[in-house]
Amino acid sequence: MYRMWGRLALVLLLPMSAAAQSASTNEREQEMQEMRARIEKLEKLVAELQKEKESKNGVATGPVGSEPLPPPSTPAAPAAQPEGTVASMDHSGGQGANAAERKFPALHFRGFGDVDFAATDDKTTHSGFNMGQFILHISSPLSEKVSVFGETSFTAQTTPTATVYNVDVERLLIRYDYNDFFKLSFGRYHTPINYWNTAFHHGLWLQTTIARPEMIRFGGRFQPVHFVGMQAEGNIPSGPLGLGYTAGLGNGRSGNIARPGDGGDVNNNRAWFANLFARPAALNGLQVGGALYGDLASPSPALTGNPQFRELIMSAHVVWTKETPEFLAEFAHVRHRNTVTQQEFNSSSAYAQVAYRLPGVARKWKPYYRFEWSNINPSDPLFSVGAAFQPAPVVNDLTGSTVGVRYDITNFAAFKGEYRHTARRATDPVVNGFFLQTCFTF
Amino acid sequence: MRTHLKLRICLVLGCLVVFSLISFRTAGTPADTDVAIVVNSANPVSNLTLSELRKIYFGDRQYWKGNLPVLVLMRSRGAHEREVVLRVVFEMTEERYTKYWVAKVMRAEVSDPPASLYSFGMLQEGVRGNPGAIGYVNVNDVRPGIKILRIDGLLPGESGYPLR
């Protein structure tokens, strides 16, 4: 009997709660209407004051009819307001127009930072905290068609005697927009032959995981992370395919192949790249693309026999940028040809990462998994010689898995925790590690 | 036993009917909630597909024909019209939207995110005062002097109009 009463009470309560909800919706709607009415009233008041000011100054106020009317082809504005309201809108001092107007030159700052903790069973490293990078990003529209972008990093580095902060100009470029199909820029870029490299840059808050994939790690040698030169980019008229391109010419790799030629090229051969991608209109969030990169690498200090290496990198990516799920996969193949002996060295690397933003109350949580694989030719001098390219590490085979979770504390800060299992060459020990990071933007 | 079962079914159905009635009463008619995409009356464009609108709002198309720069205007957080545009055009939450523009500026694809305006009056003045501007406003709040765009050939209030 009590069960029956309980059920009846539940059944009665459900519609009541729904009605309460509906009442709150109505209240909100009413509040909104009241707020709209207040805004209208304020706008009228501003218009009247403006009118009064203008008449005091002896400036003639234009009649309502002087406002440009919609052309005949324009659909009639439904539910047009009485003329008085229109007049108030017309003469309210153009606050909206001013607020919407872009100012030149303007300067926008954004910062990124992270603090990390690492503990692994690798006997050659110590566990502990470390400061990540402190990034300052600036963007400045100089006119409607000219913009400047800059990015500076401060990175903690421990030398045998002290801890210093290494300051680096990560990017600095000026871009001239002709139209959507052709934009030309000059400066220092993140080489756009790798999706991760251009999508997340140094802003660790932007990426889901703690670390970048091995194939595009900062200070790594497998692919050039930075590029100094010029770049053309734009859309390709392709309707629903949504094609776009980026192509560039520049200095390519420096004597230390992990660095770009900021201060000048090390040879008379320019590096080049071409990148083609599609963002199909029917699948909002999908991007598919591929890129080619060519260069002549002239290692310095010179290797035995003073060889140079023709480099050709081919890469491809498929990404789904929505978070339910998020999917990133990239592949890159690097070919080096010794110009003295004509010997070729081929190496490949790939990763696939999947993440999922949990629904409802758990939406701040985003678990993820990444698998990485690299097959490096151990005879390739550019990847295997250690001393010449310090501090860039030797590039080795890799099979690795990363499992972790991201928790967004606010819209602009996150915690990440991940476990990594990394196996390299057969002779190297398997490394397991636990990593924590808090990253933010401001 | 059977009577109990029938009673339960009746009660569940009753609840569903009550819910439906409440929802119907509060939902309003589609024309009331439609969001109009508006441009400056000098803009020769009168129709956009939803995917073209997406490209504009995503910052992937930054120029009108004739190389006039597009000025994308958004309403401030909390406005119903913004919720509709985020849901239908961006297919994003507020959090994702914020992140999207931080990343877009960081990638040097745009130099600043769209301006967010507090009132529909300000937004309409913004559209009227800037030849390349595009914005959105509740269809009932549209004033003369700006042009409503057809989306996929449809005007607000017409059956199948996507922004509602």
Image (spheres, rainbow, N blue to C red):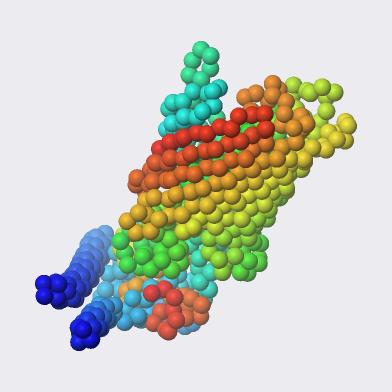
Q: Is residue B62 above or below residue A116?
A: below
**Residue A315 visible somewhere in the drawing:** yes
Q: Position of residue B74 (x, y in %)?
A: 39, 61
Q: Residue at x 67, y 33 (%)?
A: A425
Q: Quadrant of the C terminus of chain B?
A: bottom left
Q: Is residue B93 above or below residue A294?
A: below
**A201 relative to A96 in the view: left or right:** right
Q: Position of residue A267 (x, y in %)?
A: 78, 31
Q: Quadrant of the N terminus of chain B?
A: bottom left
Q: Position of residue B83 (x, y in %)?
A: 36, 65
- Judging depth in this view, the residue of A436 and A439 nearest the camera is A436
User: Image quadrant of residue A256?
Assistant: top right
**A333 relative to A439 in the view: left or right:** right
Q: Residue at x 75, y 36 (%)?
A: A377
Q: Residue at x 38, y 47 (%)?
A: A408
**A121 relative to A386 in the view: left or right:** left
- Judging depth in this view, the residue of A387 and A152 nearest the camera is A387
